[in-house]
Image (spheres, rainbow, N blue to C red):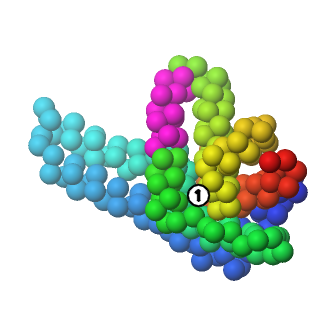
Amino acid sequence: MFASIGRALSLIFDPALFGVVAKVVALTILLFIVLLVGVEVALHFLPTLGAPEVNRVLELLAPVFLLTAFFTLGGPVAALFGSLYLDRIAAAVEKRWYASDPEAQGVSTRTGLGAGLRLAALVLLANMILLPADVFAPGFGEVATIVVNGFLLGREYFELAALRHISLKAADALRKRNDGSVFGAGLILSLLTFVPIVNLFAPLFGAALMVHLYKRMARETPP
């Protein structure tokens, strides 16, 4: 696991992939800017709600809310954009570390985008369901959120890495035989998504990490 983490980090900071990292982060920031402008415009044309002061308070709180959302939802949003570039990241990992292996078929843009949408939706839904626990049971709520997100992130990222080489059925079987390692990698990703700014890079790191895990498991686990 530690060797895979080190290799994944080395590739994420590779100058050759700087363009991919920059695009994902820029798209994420751009999305929140668009949301901020859209909310401000909507509030500007919002009818008076009882008293003008109510509208004014809403206008003042909107940027604060979206700034908070940027830090808490940056991971899921970046995961969506990151899925568009996952195949390129995986190809770079395999080219550097597994050049002698058979070339992967890759994952189509449609499949990657669909997986990214599903992952973002699942993470957001899980976080919303667990939000009351975060508010009324501090500590327990955060731990529960990290664990649930870890399960979802590990499962989905491993599947995307494996689908470059094998069928969905085979990928699911391989994951089940290595549940502990996949879940452990997912927990690492989940923790990273809670760190502001770092959460923007977490999906890219996760993609590289899961490629290394898949390669190791495919060699060590008998079919």
Question: Image point 13% across, 32% down: which residue?
Answer: 50
Question: Image point 64% across, 23% down: which residue?
Answer: 140
Give left or right: position of 177 versus 21: right
Task: Tell which residue pokes out farthest to the bottom in this image.
Answer: 16
Q: Which quadrant of the view contains residue 206?
A: bottom right
Residue 126: say if magenta.
Answer: yes
Q: Which residue is mark 1?
A: 200
Check the image and report above or below for 123 versus 211: above
Residue 218: image x %, image y %?
80, 54
**Identity of the amino acid at label 1?**
Leu
Q: Is disc 1 surrounded by few (<14), some (14 to 19) or many (20+) residues within 10 Å?
A: many
Task: Tell which residue pokes out farthest to the front in this image.
Answer: 223
Question: Image point 76% across, 54% down: which residue?
Answer: 214
Residue 47: say if magenta.
Answer: no
Residue nearest the observer in this picture, 10 or 208: 208
Q: Which quadrant of the view contains residue 101?
A: bottom right
Under circle 1, the secondary element is helix
**Does residue 183 appear anywhere in the picture?**
no
Give left or right: position of 21 versus 126: right
Residue 30: image x %, image y %?
42, 65
Residue 209: image x %, image y %?
74, 57
The magenta-colored residue range is 120-134
Residue nearest the observer in this picture, 100 or 114: 100
Residue 24: image x %, image y %?
54, 66
Question: Image point 72% across, 55% down: which residue?
Answer: 210
**Does residue 114 appear anywhere in the picture?**
yes
